[in-house]
Amino acid sequence: MSAILFARHFDFLVGAWKFSLLKCLRLSNHKW
């Protein structure tokens, strides 16, 4: 059970990281 929760948490962290990365890329593109 803990393994499933850990997997969900890990997926959430990866998703948030990708979202923030895309946001930073968009901001940098707007600056250019």
Image (cartoon, rainbow, N blue to C red):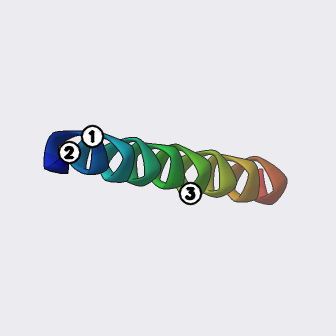
Residue for badge 2:
1
Q: Residues within 10 Å of mark 3 (few under 14, many from 20)?
A: few
Taking the spot 63% from the left edge, 45% from the top edge, the residue there is 22
Q: Is residue 20 left or right of residue 32?
A: left
Expressed as whole percent of the image width and height from the top left, the position of residue 18 reads 52, 43
Q: Is the N terminus in the top left, top right, bottom left or bottom right quadrant?
A: top left
Q: Are marks 3 and 2 in contact (CB under 8 Å)?
A: no
Q: Is residue 28 above or below residue 15?
A: below
Badge 3 amino acid: Ser
Disc 3 secondary structure class: helix
Badge 1 amino acid: Ile
Expressed as whole percent of the image width and height from the top left, the position of residue 4 reads 27, 40
Tell me which label, 3 or 2, sits earlier in the chain. 2
Residue for badge 3:
20
Q: Are marks 2 and 1 in contact (CB under 8 Å)?
A: yes
The mark lying in front, picked from 2 and 1, is 2
Taking the spot 83% from the left edge, 54% from the top edge, the residue there is 30
The mark lying in front, picked from 1 and 3, is 1
Expressed as whole percent of the image width and height from the top left, the position of residue 21 reads 53, 49
Residue for badge 1:
4
Disc 2 secondary structure class: loop
Disc 1 secondary structure class: helix
The mark lying in front, picked from 3 and 2, is 2
